[in-house]
Amino acid sequence: MNEADVRERLRAVTDPDLGDDVVSLGLVNGIDLDEGAGTVHVSLALGAPFSPHESTIADDVRAALSDAGLDVELSASIPNDLSADEQVLPGVENVIAVASGKGGVGKSTVAVNLAAGLSELGARVGLFDADVYGPNVPRMVAAEERPQTDGETIVPPERYGVKLMSMDFLTGEDDPVIWRGPMVHKIITQLVEDVEWGELDYLVMDLPPGTGDTQLTILQTLPLTGAVIVTTPQDVALDDATKGLRMFGKHDTNVLGIAENMAGFRCPDCGGFHEIFGSGGGKALAADHDLPFLGGIPLDPAVRTGGDDGAPVVLGDGDTADAFRVLVENVANNAGVVRRREMSGGR
């Protein structure tokens, strides 16, 4: 067996999202065959660690080579033409923005559970609470530890396996944040440059609601893999979510999908299911704009109080936890589609 034989076997492995084999799509970075040692190392262009679909591709590659009498070793990376000095966040594989057109739709809740869920899958995750005017992520995860600094760099604390940075760490507990656009741009840029995120598979950005200075700064500064738009089922939320979609579209940012929060309430007493804010709005919005629907999260008091010890609900059990896990997997899968499509020339 030689390298050409290995490559031919890999043509049997199909990307479940792009619909062609991994060789034709250009997703095989390289093959290192050592017949004497009986090993073959395959480098794959997979960019969303621990996404179910990319894990399936890796398993299929192993299966395609399993009867060749070789020990199979796999690695995954997306080649980058920029040097480490030229990259904005050189150690971060994917930056995912969580946004909403208006406040009160549970955007921060989705961001926290997305980050915790990705970490639970095994990924290295950071969560940047960039909501300048209303940062509340530290409260939501009961983060008592503050960032450490040597005067030049900031080391973020960790909670539930997630590295945390928030504007809340930089202001007084009850101090209002009254900053104009240039100040917002400066502080966001400084935090991006000065926080020691280390090596991360995903950095989740919790954006403020709307389409203001903070969002524009992040869109212009960071290499976003894509954005998650959070809405609730009612029309007013959907109208504002559409504005958010247009903002990302104007800046050529991929939208990974629509998440619908507060999608119905199951009464713990009677067992009845009540669609308090309507139904199907998020799914319809996704269909209207030809975007993935990431899932619906029910209205659940446990989301407000957290799970055991205030932990994000996604780490617990029950229908709401399951719904968040579906959302997490869909976001990771769609991030992988974006990265692999880039490698395959947009196919």
Image (cartoon, rainbow, N blue to C red):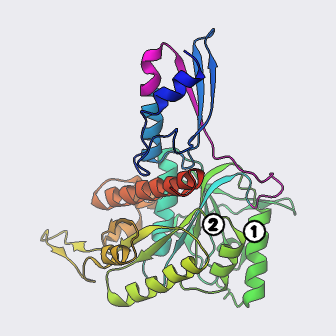
* Element at label 2: strand
Res 125 seen here: no
In this image, 285 relative to 130: left or right?
left
Above or below 347: residue 267? below
Q: Are marks 1 and 2 in contact (CB under 8 Å)?
A: yes
Q: Earlier in the sequence, mark 1 or mark 2?
A: 2
Magenta part of the protein: which range? 63-88
Q: Find residue 59 and report its horizontal and vertical position in percent.
A: 44, 33
In this image, 143 relative to 259: left or right?
right
Residue type at mark 1 is Leu
Residue 191 is tagged as 1
In this image, 193 relative to 344: left or right?
right
Above or below 167: residue 226? above
At 62% from the left edge and 20% from the top edge, which residue is drawn? 33
How far apart are the alpha carbons under marks 1 and 2? 9 Å
Q: Find residue 72 and report its horizontal and vertical position in percent.
A: 53, 22
Of 67 and 323, the residue lying toward us: 67
User: Considering the image in quadrants, where does the N terminus appear?
Assistant: top right
State which quadrant residue 32 falls in. top right
At 63% from the left edge and 66% from the top edge, which residue is drawn? 128
The count of marks equals: 2
Q: Which residue is mark 2?
A: 128
Residue 148 part of the magenta segment: no
Q: Find residue 226 and report its horizontal and vertical position in percent.
A: 55, 65
Res 20 seen here: yes
Q: Find residue 93 and report its horizontal and vertical position in percent.
A: 64, 52
